[in-house]
């Protein structure tokens, strides 16, 4: 059985969408929240949607006891402060997966925040203990596409960060029907991937698309 996915702030649209897709693929998920009761309530709602019991809900702190993959799905504005509050709970064997995107909504387009570290992931990496592998994933996937189980997805997920861990996370993502994990390289690729999210949202707004995602055209010959 695949090790458990834990989601810090998993009660929001992005966390719920990721939880649903993993759970639908038979992968156990724990939804974390600042309020344990809220985590349990959302988990119950998602289980009802899938007619399963594979999703649990608890506090952000308690997911660390059971989950191997610790996903961060809180707003970027609160990501550093949230991570700092939980950083002592990381233990050997955990893999951190950053889903947050430092977006700035401007008039007529979406931009990324100007950060000293050049990307949200590099900003957060500074907080994580050195021995915990850092991976970024799901940054270009829209929550409403993930949450709408009738959406076939049919798109790529850009995965970057620690060399061994990104491969492992990609293998877990590939268990989700409709998703193909593409390994992009080291954490510095967050600079490009986070901008792709800004691009997708702006494209959606300009063209009145409900949803758009990325799929690479690959030639190997
Ligand atoms: N939405 C998308 O389509 C999408 C796509 C790609 C990436 N992302 C990224 O995924 C992350 C989550 O997106 P979302 O739309 O699900 O966000 P959200 O609904 O605004 O927030 C997610 C959860 O974060 C927790 N949270 C809110 N304020 C907090 C605070 N001050 N401190 C600690 N926790 C707080 C809440 O959980 P509790 O109240 O239960 O603690 C909330 O349910 C963001 O960083 C976003 O950039 C989103």
Image (cartoon, grey):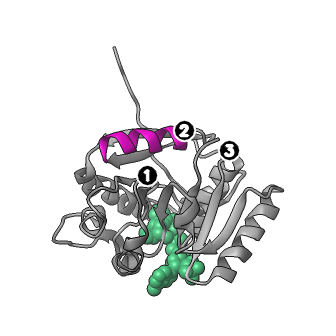
Q: Residue 120, located in which quarter of the rendered image?
A: bottom left
Q: Residue 40, located in which quarter of the rendered image?
A: bottom right
The residue that label 3 is drawn on is 25
The numbered dot on residue 174 is 2
The numbered dot on residue 93 is 1
Residue 13 belongs to the span the image colors magenta: no
Residue 116, percent from left and from top: 15, 71
| In this rendering, position of residue 214 left or right of residue 46 | left
Q: Whole-Å distance between the Cαs marked 1 and 3?
A: 23 Å
Whether 106 is drawn above or below 162: the answer is below
- Image quadrant occupied by the C terminus: top left
Mark with earlier residue (1, 3): 3
Segment colored magenta? 162-173
Instruction: Out of 145 and 70, give the one closest to the viewer.
Output: 70
Residue 209, percent from left and from top: 54, 59
| In this rendering, position of residue 155 left or right of residue 58 | left
Mark with earlier residue (2, 3): 3
Mark 3: secondary structure = loop
């Amino acid at each position: 059985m695949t090790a458990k996915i834990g989601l810090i702030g998993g009660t929001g649209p992005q966390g719920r969408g990721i939880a649903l897709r993993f759970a639908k693929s038979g992968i156990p998920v724990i939804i974390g929240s600042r309020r344990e009761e809220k985590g349990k309530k959302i988990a119950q709602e998602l289980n009802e949607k899938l007619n399963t019991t594979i999703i649990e809900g608890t506090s952000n702190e308690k997911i660390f006891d059971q989950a191997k993959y610790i996903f961060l799905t809180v707003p970027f504005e609160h990501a550093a402060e949230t991570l700092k509050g939980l950083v002592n709970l990381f233990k050997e064997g955990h893999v951190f997966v950053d889903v947050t995107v430092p977006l700035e909504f401007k008039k007529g387009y979406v931009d990324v925040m100007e950060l000293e570290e050049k990307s949200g992931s590099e900003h957060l990496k500074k907080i994580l203990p050195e021995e915990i592998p850092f991976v970024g994933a799901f940054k270009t996937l829209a929550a409403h596409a993930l949450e709408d189980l009738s959406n076939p997805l049919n798109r790529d997920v850009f995965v970057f960060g620690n060399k061994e861990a990104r491969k492992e996370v990609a293998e877990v993502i590939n268990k989700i029907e409709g998703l193909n994990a593409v390994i992009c390289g080291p954490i510095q690729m967050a600079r490009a991937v986070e901008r792709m999210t800004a691009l997708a949202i702006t494209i959606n707004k300009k063209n009145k698309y409900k949803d758009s995602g990325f799929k690479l055209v690959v030639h190997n010959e």
